[in-house]
Amino acid sequence: MKEKSPTDKEQIIKDTFQLTSARYLSQGIGFFTAIAMRRFLGPFYMGIWSLFKVIIGYVPYLFFGVERGAVNKIPFYAGSGDKHSEEEVKNTSFSVMFLVSALAGAGLLTTALILRNHHPKEVIIGLCALSIYLILNSLCTFYRLLLRAKRNFSLLSKATIFDAVINLILIFLLVSRFKIYGLYMVLILVLFLNIIYIHIHARYRVRFGIKRNRVLSLMRVGFPITVVGLLQWVLGSLDRIMIAKMIGIASVGFYSIPIMVKSYAGQLSGFGTVLYPRLMEAYGKSQNLEEIKKYVTVPTAINAYILPVILGVIFFIVPLLVRKILPKFIPGILAMQILLLEIFFASCCAQAYYFIIAMKKQARVIFIVISAIILNVIGNYVLIKKGYGIYGVAYATSFVTFLNFIVLQTYAMKHFAKAKEILFFLGKIIAPLIYTLIIALFLESSVKIPNMYIETAVKSFLLLVASLPGLLYINRETKIINLIFNMLKRPKS
């Protein structure tokens, strides 16, 4: 009997689960890769690589948002059935990314020739290797862009794991023997193998060709998104910058515990990545707000009821791990527990943000993020001066992220809901967090067992039991838990 095709809701859950799992597995492999690199290279060569990473980090901004515009426009035209425009956008974005990267690579080659007698050969050869890396990276980035825009999250997940595994293997094979030169070989080989892997499985066809009107259209959409991304990076870095400047480097070290947890817990929900192309495709098909408003409210509600439970368990488990494995970082535990609030609200922002992009009002988000940066600077400064240290910074950061969520969600929902509906929805989102926070604080103060492992296990179990009503409610409303269990039980074809 032929297996029934999954519904759109089931496919969204499957894609989100696959992508999130692939990201975590990739990060786990990356942990060992990072250790191996530092062991094989040593401080001097790692310093060179760190400087080269700065160059690599700035290259995407040279595209002026073309690649981000493509992620927006390709699913939009696919939904509207305009295959001609979809192809033109695909070919134009590919051509611009390739051309810009080739010009940047040529610039690095020229720089290497000019500086060849003034810098160590490791640096000069590295600049030459980077010139090739930039071109290959543009091709690999474009392929991943297409996988996302065309909703091929299964292959995107596999490619993410493939990249991590190949990188680890080549680091051990080449960097262990050839040091920094081995790393240069790894950079090029990993990208080349990634391109081959995705091409074999996806078979996307592109042609070189630049349409001026398409470039301008992509930039109008993508450049504000790029600016928002840069501003969000500034917002996310403010806490460490101000701690280093006003408190000291040692405190930045303590604060690395909440940052580490944030880097992992922040990826708990892949809804934003998975839903964005679906949202654009649905809007391109109907141009009807009623058809896409569910992308703003349903995933946010699911996050609101499931994330607090996971973050509550982290609230109990991470302190145990820090005390047993990293006792020198114990002062960072409370800051981590406070910053869990920031993780929650940041995870709930994505859907509203993507909706605003669909409405072509992404420039409005620039003002919102700039306001958040100013508020965060003021909040951090005041609380540090009052003597609250890294805990004050964590409070200020969490509060500003909360305000950012309120403003983004309200602005998005104003397009299809009245003020009373918006207030009710916001209350519905915040209520599970407050409930979980009260339970967690109560358990933290009242459950005392001599054995730390047993105490942590008991607290986590009791929190899960207390969270069951909320989980049952959101499952009744969305069938999310049923869908996850059905997906896990379904045999692979």
Image (spheres, rainbow, N blue to C red):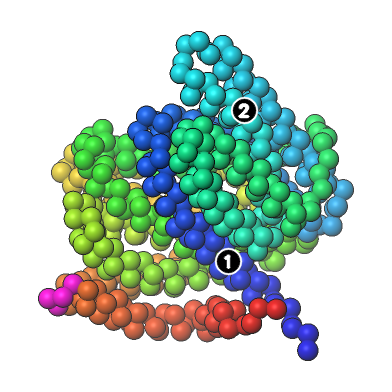
Range of magenta residues: 448-452
Q: Which residue is mark 1?
A: 18
Is residue 328 visible in the rendered image? The answer is yes
**Residue at image coords 56%, 43%:** 364
Q: Classify residue 5 as left or right of residue 190.
A: right
Q: Label 1: state its secondary structure.
A: helix
Can you say whether 72 is above or below 55 in the image?
Answer: below
Kind of residue indicated by mark 2 = Ser
Nearest to the eye among marks 1 and 2: give it.
Answer: 2
Kind of residue indicated by mark 1 = Gln
Q: Quadrant of the N terminus?
A: bottom right
Q: Earlier in the sequence, mark 1 or mark 2?
A: 1
Q: Nearer the viewer, residue 184 or 233?
A: 184
Q: Label 2: state its secondary structure.
A: helix
Q: Quadrant of residue 483?
A: bottom right
Majority SS type along the magenta span: loop
The furthest residue to the front: 177
Q: Quadrant of residue 188?
A: top right
Classed neighbour count for the residue bearing mark 1: other residues with Cα under 10 Å, few (<14), some (14–19), many (≥20)? some
**Residue at image coords 56%, 79%:** 488
Is residue 76 visible in the rendered image? The answer is no
Q: Check residue 382 for magenta coloring.
A: no
What label does residue 131 carry, if any? Answer: 2
